[in-house]
Amino acid sequence: MVTYLLQVTFFVAFFTLDCRRVEQKRNGVLPCCVSHPNFVPTPMDAEHSLSWRLIDKLFGKVVLTLPGKIIVLALTVGFATFGALGSMQLEQWFDPVWFLPKESYLAEYLVVKQQEFPKVGSEATAFVSEVDFRNEFGKILNLSRTLEAASFVDDVKTWPIDFVTFCDANFNVDAENATLSESDFRLYLSKFLFSRSGGKYQRNFHFEKPPVCGQPTPKLKTVSIDFTFAHFSAPYEWIPAMDNAKETMAQLEFDGLAIVWSEMFATWVTDKVISQEVLRNLILALICVMGMTAFLIAEPQTVGWILLCVLLTLLDVCGFMYYWGLTIDIVSCIGKIQSTPN
């Protein structure tokens, strides 16, 4: 729409001004100077121009002949088939590392990391906040065990399980099944966090104020469970893993805030959104093209041929993207959608 508006406003306006300049014999570079008072346009026969002769020989004597039509149709079908085969194998994949300069420190670090630790997955964290942690501890424990048993998880820092083991070993208390009082829960948690087995989990707790060794912990505001996703090789693996992790949190039905977060979610969500929206946006772009051509041309057959040409162009572009080693990502998605009206 903007392209057509620019053509009928900006382009037409400047074309009009230029016609006035020619009529007033003004210079093309310095229109304020009347430097060509005796200028007379040289009449030109279009049939003697180079472009006319080239088109006449190419279309009139090659393309529009029967052999030429057969060759054009054969090439069209060939390119369409070639493009269709490539489009069916085109992958949807976005990796922000592609946009890093190869000589940058970060790019070199990521290359070394991939070489030395090729099977290490992405780190993630499950956060639980604004809940009664003493009464909700069973759900937190269940979350830890569910993540530990999940196929999409490689490793879990299971502090809830270690806390239950610590209470049983040191206080002979079944923290999993027994209903602890608020004071006992805070005291045992303080002992755990300052113990040899639980000290490493202090970073997973956020209190109103810093806890003191030997004293019950202050009011607990947020807890987290660190885990590592398995190593994934393609979007069809990490997108379901991300969704399953979020669904696991939702199924536990915490009374407060419960979310899963990972640095890789920015990339994975992009993959998920692109896979859902690229087809929809292309269809919307085609509808806009068809609607605008129908409005300006108002001839159904011509509109149909234009739509067919646009469809074949998109098919060929998507197919050749596969052979060029490209994928459907943010850049290619925007490029395809913007090129559709053109």
Image (cartoon, rainbow, N blue to C red):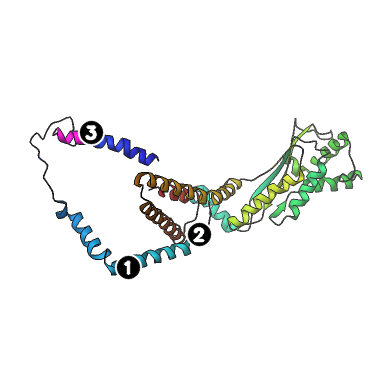
Of 35 and 83, nearer the camera is 83
Please give the name of the residue rendered at 28% of the width and 37% of the height, measured from the top-left corner.
Answer: 12
Q: Which residue is identified by label 3?
A: 17
Q: Which mark is residue 57?
A: none
What's the amino acid at mark 1? Ile
Please give the name of the residue rendered at 29% of the width and 38% of the height, measured from the top-left corner.
Answer: 11
Q: Which numbered disc, 2 or 3, marks the residue that appears first in the sequence? A: 3
Q: Position of residue 232 (x, y in %)?
A: 62, 57
**Are dots 3 and 1 in contact, CB under 8 Å?**
no
**Are dots 2 and 1 in contact, CB under 8 Å?**
no
Of 220 and 78, nearer the camera is 78
Of 45 and 145, nearer the camera is 45
Q: Which residues are magenta?
A: 19-25
The span from disc 2 to disc 1 (Cα, nearest Å) is 28 Å
What's the amino acid at mark 3? Leu
Residue 342 in the figure: left or right of residue 254: left
Residue 193 in the figure: left or right of residue 7: right
Camera-near label (2 vs 1) is 1
Q: Which residue is identified by label 1?
A: 71
Q: Which numbered disc, 2 or 1, marks the residue that appears first in the sequence? A: 1
The span from disc 3 to disc 1 (Cα, nearest Å) is 45 Å
Q: Position of residue 176 (x, y in %)?
A: 86, 46
